[in-house]
Amino acid sequence: MMLTRRHFMAGTVTIATTFALSQFSIQSQPAKPTVSTGKDGIFICNEDSNTLSVIDPLTNQVETTINLTSFDEDARPPFRFVTGGVMPTQAAMISKPLYHGAIHLHGSAPSPDSRLLAVTGRGTSNLYLIDVATRRAIGNRPNPLAEPGKAVNSEWLSSGLLLGREPHEPTFTRNGKELWVALRGENRIAILEVEAALSALRQGMTTGAIRQHLRTIDGPAQVWFSQDGQTAFVISQKVPIVEVFAVNPDRRGFSRPKLKTRIDLREFDRFGFTPFQKTTPDGREIWFSHKLADAVSVRATDGAYRSLDFLALGDRARPNHLEFVENDRGKVAYITLARIDDRRGGIASSQVAIVDRSVAPGKRRIIGTFYTHGREAHGLWTNPEHTRLYIAHEQDELPGTPAAGQTVCTVFDVSMPEKPIFMTQIPLGELVLPSGKLRNKKSINLVYVRPSTPSQTA
């Protein structure tokens, strides 16, 4: 039976109060050390500013902002971000004459070897590859207009790779040879050869990397691969169906996809709006987020793809992303709830639902929620030790709050997975351009990347 929002929230008051007390006490305690290499980064896609914020987990501060706009590459007014002292609105910003930067930066995924980050521009129908070590977009080149004393950027932005309408989420194959990008505005997947993509970007080309387009259900939102890399799951935001493909790699490791089956989700998602999916760390289950149905469902990844769980989250919970944390103190799934704008000490905040995964499938339930300390939670990701959790938010903080007017990332100590403890709120600040400051805002996807360590896509 679907829980109402009132019943759902009433059942979590005691748990939330306990968490609030724990979160208050952590403020004066030093953060526990991580096993960071010193080059770890939390990469956050900011959709309205078309930037990537990079957070250093050792300091929990913004290390840098990666510029995927093309403003201020030329000193003349049509190229500037701020002209005549006037800062443009977001809509006017991306409509400026001669703008060739990203529009609506949204999806992201790390390569299996954590060397690359793939990010998509929904509005520009393109994809960028980011060098994790240098924090730079591959294909950028020195700006020939950059001269001493001239107020222009030192680099000219790559135009990325053109893919098709509304590229939503990119995913690397488990062997790292390909990128499958869901074209949500169409009914197909763009399959790119990674080395060809790198070569094209370095030559300043926008095409030449797509190996094939795979016909799918309408509105494909994301691809995720089974742990052995042999199966691809494709979800949709238009129809209540999951398509399952055999990857069928050739001797070189390149896919030759063949449709295996279609899974009917109407029982769980009559709206046909499933934007996110992920396999568990052991690879035995795949979890689906049904945003308009206010629920998540779980299936086995073996050949039967049998239903294992259905978890109602309450009216208007609006689940976005989910993440798994497993350590010697617990085994849980976290699910960000986008539109529950409740009050934590009088301040608007989203919540995250906690699912106990230590019990057998069919017996799982929501054991509580915790406040994210931010508004409209979206992406979330854990560190490799499963002791820290980072959460991105779409909306800015309200006036009268500590980070008023800022989009924030928040950090939790999840050493005890069933009792997350708030650590800090990180304002994302601005990208400083020669003509003015562009505020980082509307964070969507978030990934934690540790160079030289296999990622969650490995």
Image (cartoon, grey):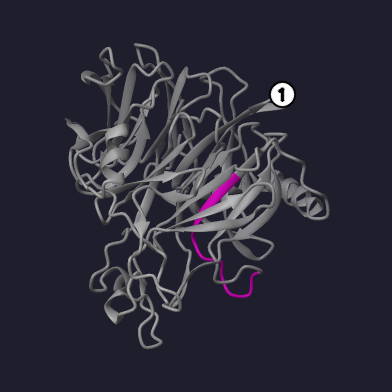
Q: Residue at the spot x=37%, y=75% of the render?
A: 81
Residue 395 painted magenta: yes
Picture quarter containing residue 77?
bottom left
- Residue 282 lies, in percent from the top left, at 52, 19
- Residue 300 in percent (x, y) is at 42, 17
Counting from the top left corner in percent of width and height, residue 165 is at 20, 48
The structure residue drawn at horizontal position 61% and vertical position 53%, both measured from the top left corner, is 410
Return the residue found at the far bottom: 84
Q: Nearer the viewer, residue 176 or 420?
A: 176
Q: Secondary structure at mark 1?
A: loop
Residue at x 30%, y 30% (from the top left corner)? 234
- The residue that mark 1 highlights is 328
Along the line of sight, the residue nearer the viewer: 138 or 265: 138
**Residue 246 relative to residue 409: left or right:** left
Any part of residue 7 in sight: no
Image height of 230 relative to 136, above or below:
above
Over which residues does the magenta segment extend?
390-401
Question: Is 311 rendered above or below residue 231?
Answer: below
Is 78 in the magenta?
no
Q: Amino acid at mark 1?
A: Asp
Quarter of the picture containing the N terminus is: top left
